[in-house]
Image: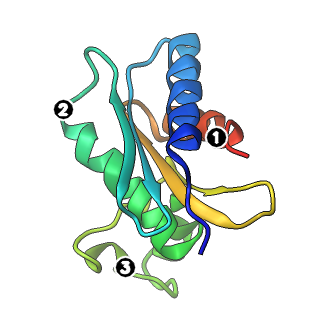
Amino acid sequence: MSDITLEQAQAAVEAAVAKSREMGVLMDIAVVDAGTNLKAFARMDGAWLGSIDIARKKARTARSFNMETGAIGQLSQPGGPLFNIEHSNGGLISFPGGIPLRNAAGDIIGAIGVSGSSVEDDHAVAEAGAAAVS
């Protein structure tokens, strides 16, 4: 199994922080490795305390199921095939802001989770962090 390096994890966090600043939002940003263990984290000054746990869970959720948390959210609506999945695995997050991270070969090596603003902003910042990993 491939795993994210510290350098890659820090690059993702730095890119996400830069995007957050560009957007004028304060975020909590978590990067987990292939085993869902926390690899890198940043809490921007003034970012919500409650978003620390959400960012970590978004990253863990994205890696655990190898899909963006927003996609899980669509599948977990009432009547959907993953309805109530957020209650499994010690609590998952099923709204946007978590993205699996891939290396240059396309292997999933971890995930990023971002929380602190609207889910649209969270997702945009997570995308910026994901784009920094190769």
In the image, residue 40 above or below residue 111? above
| Most foreground residue, 18 or 26 | 18
| Residue 69 percent location from the top left of the image | 51, 60
Q: Which of marks 1 and 3 precedes in the sequence? A: 3
Q: Amino acid at mark 1?
A: Glu
Which residue matches tag 2? 49
Q: Quadrant of residue 105?
A: bottom right
Q: Amino acid at mark 3?
A: Ile
Which residue matches tag 1? 127
| Residue 50 percent location from the top left of the image | 19, 38
| Residue name at image x 64 percent, y 65 percent | 108
Which residue matches tag 3? 85
For marks 2 and 1, give the CA distance. Answer: 22 Å
| Residue name at image x 58 percent, y 71 percent | 66
Mark 2 Cα shell of 10 Å, populated few (<14), some (14-19), many (≥20): few
Q: How is the image coloured?
A: rainbow
Q: Nearer the viewer, mark 2 or mark 3?
A: 2
Q: Amino acid at mark 2?
A: Leu
Describe the element under mark 3 as helix, strand or loop.
Answer: helix
Left or right: residue 45 compared with residue 97: left
| Residue 28 percent location from the top left of the image | 35, 33
Left or right: residue 18 compared with residue 30: right
Mark 1 Cα shell of 10 Å, populated few (<14), some (14-19), many (≥20): many
Residue 121 visible, this orientation: yes
Left or right: residue 131 compared with residue 41: right
In the image, residue 129 above or below residue 78? above
Q: Nearer the viewer, mark 3 or mark 1?
A: 1
Asked if marks 3 and 1 touch (Cβ < 8 Å), the reply is no
